[in-house]
Amino acid sequence: MARGSYGRGVTSTRTDRWLRLDGTTNTRDLGGLPTVDGGTTVRGRVLRSDNLQTLSEVDVRRLVEDLRLREVVDLRSTAEVLLEGRGPLRAVPGVRHRHFTLLPERGHHTDVFAVEEADAPELPAGWAESILPRQVAEDDQEETPAVRSYLGYLAHRPENVVAALRALAGDGSPDGGGATVVHCAAGKDRTGVVVAFALAVAGVPDEEIVADYALTAEVIDDLVAKLASSPTYAEDMQRRDVASHTPRAETMRRLLELLHERHGGPRGWLTVHGFGPGEQDALRARLRDQQPG
């Protein structure tokens, strides 16, 4: 895939890609983005979002009835899922929930949605205590903390990055049986990395991927306030200022640069980790209105 130039004047991240819901602050559609071959990603297939715990009844109806939401891909840790409890979409029989944590965790890596909460691992006093320390490769020591974190997702949980993308690809048909939403807590870091890979596979140029990632900065004040209202995240929100939570374009730009240098780009990384051309075609078809193969 052609590498982006990170040029100025990107206009694809328009406000009409935002999905304004009562219970989220950072939900938007991955449709409407230009591709390197002159195409456009299709709306209503894949959404990215922050935590879905506080959706209103109106939100749920809009997602399920209007947008035909059929699957939720949750990138939070096991502890986060259990501490936050069952969100409103868990009560909707037609919506499937899948869990792929991107953080190294203590204990068993259980898909929390595949078992009853009673069978899930016991939580420590604070959810952050369930996260294992990341090992930083020597070559990455000089990178910024955010870039090191993103590289950590790829180093520690590559199988779940791939599994999340397989879920986004659906059954290989363009409409995939309905819409899918991928989310974490804020919808910016873990979600941002998975979305970057999905958009790269769809043929979205690097500068547009960077712009989409940075778009969360427009809602960061409301996003931090929302997370601060939850006991699960309040301490972290209060410990750091808003600026430290704000995504910066240079973070995603640097991640993409490293992927190009080391693997020939996101698609090269995916191929090395078992998400090869056939599956990439299926994901591309999901986002591009093209049949795989």
Image (cartoon, rainbow, N blue to C red):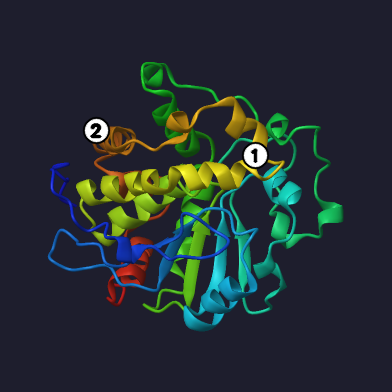
Near-viewer residue (62 or 213): 62
Which residue is found at the position 24% from the left and 41% from the top? 264
Residue placed furthest toward the right: 118
Q: Earlier in the sequence, mark 2 or mark 1?
A: 1
Quarter of the figure with residue 256: top left
Say which of marks 2 and 1 sits in front: 1
Instruction: Please report contact status of discs 2 and 1: CB closer than 8 Å, yes or no.
Output: no
Q: Which residue is mark 2?
A: 261
Measured as percent of width and height from the top left, residue 291 is found at 30, 77
Q: Is residue 53 above or below residue 45?
A: above
Measured as percent of width and height from the top left, residue 261 is found at 24, 33
Near-viewer residue (133 or 9): 9
Q: Quadrant where the C terminus lies?
A: bottom left
Q: Which amino acid lies under the numbered mark 1 shown in the image of this protein?
A: Tyr
Q: Which amino acid lies under the numbered mark 2 shown in the image of this protein?
A: Glu
Quarter of the figure with residue 147: top left
In whole angstroms, how far apart are the C-alphas of marks 2 and 1? Answer: 35 Å
SS at circle 1: loop
Left/right of residue 125 with respect to residue 260 in the rendered view: right
Residue placed furthest toward the bottom: 65
Query: Dot 2: within a 10 Å radius of its alpha carbon, few (fewer than 14), some, or many (20 or more) residues?
Result: few
- Tag on residue 86? none
Figure label count = 2
Query: Dot 1: within a 10 Å radius of its alpha carbon, few (fewer than 14), some, or many (20 or more) residues?
Result: some
Which residue is found at the position 39% from the left and 78% from the top? 173
SS at circle 2: helix
Q: Which residue is mark 1?
A: 233
Which residue is found at the position 42% from the left and 48% from the top? 219
Measured as percent of width and height from the top left, residue 275 is found at 40, 54
Measured as percent of width and height from the top left, residue 236 is found at 61, 31
Q: Is residue 64 visible?
A: yes
